[in-house]
Amino acid sequence: MNKLTLSNLLLKKIVSATDSSNLIIAGDWNTTLESIDKQGRLAWKETKYRNSLVYFMKAANLIDIYRKIHPKNKTYTYESKSLELKSRIDFF
C-alpha cells in the first residue's frame, strides 16, 4: 500500500470520527514541509512522504499553524552535529 493510499485512509478515518473544524494533529513527522524548515549540507527537496502529508493536510483543510504565524522564522526541532543538519520535523 503506498503512502498516498494511507493518507486517504487516514483522512477518511479522521473525517468520519471527528469534528474537523476543531481538529489539532501534532507529532514527530520526520519530514520537513518547506525549504525554510531545513538547514545544513544536504539540500532540501520534496519527497513522496512529504507530498502525501501535504496532500492530506490540503484535503483535510489543515494548516501548519506555526508556519502560518511565523512565516520567516528558522526554528528547528532536530539537530545532528555529525550530519551538519538542522530541521523542523515536529509540528502541529
Image (spheres, helix red, strand yellow):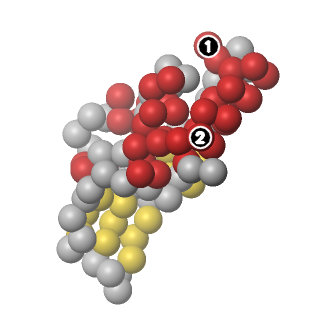
Task: Kindly identify the amino acid type of the residue bearing the numbered disc 1.
Answer: Ser
Q: Position of residue 65 (x, y in %)?
A: 44, 30
The foreground one among 18 and 48 is 48
Residue 74 in view here: no
- Residue at (39% x, 77% y) in the render: 80
- Secondary structure beneath dot 1 equals helix
Mark closer to the chain start, 1 or 2: 2
Q: Position of residue 27 (x, y in %)?
A: 60, 48
Residue furthest out toward the right: 17
Q: Would residue 37 be found to the left or right of residue 60 on screen?
A: left
The foreground one among 27 and 42 is 42
Residue ID for mark 1 = 21
Residue 39 in view here: yes
Q: Position of residue 42 (x, y in %)?
A: 24, 71
Q: Would residue 49 be found to the left or right of residue 23 on screen?
A: left
Q: Would residue 58 be found to the left or right of residue 25 on screen?
A: left
The foreground one among 67 and 12 is 12
Residue ID for mark 2 = 5
* Quadrant of the image occupied by residue 45: bottom left
Mark 1 is surrounded, within 10 Å at the Cα level, by few (under 14), some (14 to 19) or many (20 or more) other residues, namely few
- Residue at (55% x, 48% y) in the render: 3
Task: Kindly identify the amino acid type of the residue bearing the numbered disc 2.
Answer: Thr
**C-alpha gap between disc 1 and disc 2:** 23 Å
- Residue at (52% x, 33% y) in the render: 56
* Quadrant of the image occupied by residue 44: bottom left
- Residue at (44% x, 65% y) in the render: 78
Establish if 63 lies above or below 21.
below
Establish if 15 lies above or below 9.
above
- Secondary structure beneath dot 2 equals helix
Judge depth for marks 1 and 2 and give the one in front.
2
Would you say the residues marked 1 and 2 are in contact, meaning their CB atoms lie under 8 Å apart?
Answer: no
